[in-house]
Amino acid sequence: MNRAQFSDFADRFRRDGYVHVPGLLSAAEIAFHGAAVDEAVAVRKRDDSRSLDEKTPYEQSFIQCQYIWEDFPKVRALTFHDKVCAVANALVGGERLRLWHDQALYKEPGGRPTEAHQDQPYWPIAEPDTCTAWIPLQPVDEAMGCMGYVPGSHEGEHRFVDIFSAKGEGEDLMARQGRPARFVPCQVGDVIFHQGYTVHLAHPNRSDRMRRVYTAIYFRDGCTRGGDRPHPSVDRDHVAEGAVIDGSATPVAWPLPGGEAPTPGPWPEIRGERAGRAARLGIIPGGKA
Ligand code: SIN
Ligand code: NI
């Protein structure tokens, strides 16, 4: 990848709030990393035998497993992939890049749409220098639940849409956009990067196969904690409001110090009803201790 390509991606990302990069990874790489992510999801979810109908509306949008790079070391080669992180670094515009968190988002056959939302209202990061790499582990077409992005919406208003419990709020957000989303089917090896305030959503999975996707969220090194909304990525390292986000939960992802993927920090004892449930459901590490 040359300098002109990086700058083209960065221009499109600044203008539209997202950029689709076809063929960033090879099919062989996706097969290899996809197996590691599949294993992580299978282990985290091994005690969850509920059918789609028995799940909450949010869980019907996708099976979600976060921070899998931490308890599944084989996933790290994808989380800290040099090409993915180099593009992300060019998009957020700093010297160094940090990981916010990663996650698998597997949309089951028959799975609901992903409601329209912006990501960054969920994260206590003050600056807008963030991006999500959305990495499909097989082709994703309109029928399987490809992503849609509202071009330019990252420059508009910021709203917290509760996609966990308030079914239908995404429709209100879309109604306020004044322009439709562009849907982006992907081939194997494609990666879509979106900015933290870009309005995005996904179609339902009308196919008979699982829509397997891995995402990693990165931010420019030097970003600070904005607000006191609780979040493990900063709370685990006791990052105070206004302080630079720098801890073992959010390691430098690019360039990798010493060329080695980082090792994760400890998870605190899981406290509180919501966190305990998340751990038991395999959403965060620690449920099988
Ligand atoms: C999805 O994969 O359906 C949603 C991804 C996202 O919200 O970033
Ligand atoms: Ni999102």
Image (cartoon, grey):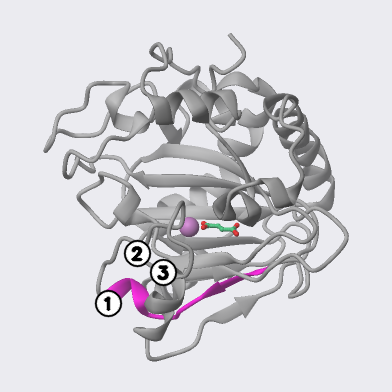
Distance from Cα at disc 1 to Cα at disc 2: 8 Å
Ligand 1 quadrant? bottom right
Furthest toward the front, the residue is 54
Name the disc covering residue 197, or none: 2
Quadrant location, the N terminus = bottom right
Distance from Cα at disc 3 to Cα at disc 1: 17 Å
- Tell me which corner region of the image, top left, top right, bottom left or bottom right, holds residue 272: top left
Q: Is residue 251 visible?
A: no
Tell me if mark 3 has few (under 14), some (14-19) or many (20+) residues whose alpha carbon lies within 10 angstroms of its own.
Answer: some
Examine the structure image and report whether residue 173 is included in the region drawn in magenta: no
State the extent of the magenta-drawn residues as a range. 146-156
Distance from Cα at disc 2 to Cα at disc 3: 16 Å
Residue at mark 1: C-beta within 8 A of ligand 2: no
Q: Position of residue 213 (x, y in %)?
A: 68, 51
**Of label 2 and label 3, which has the lower sequence position?**
3
Q: Residue at x 86, y 56 (%)?
A: 209
Tell me if mark 2 has few (under 14), some (14-19) or many (20+) residues whose alpha carbon lies within 10 angstroms of its own.
Answer: many
Which residue is label 1 attached to? 156
Residue 110 vertical position relative to residue 101 in the rendered view, above or below: below
Furthest toward the top, the residue is 289
Please, what secondary structure does the residue beneath circle 1 have?
loop
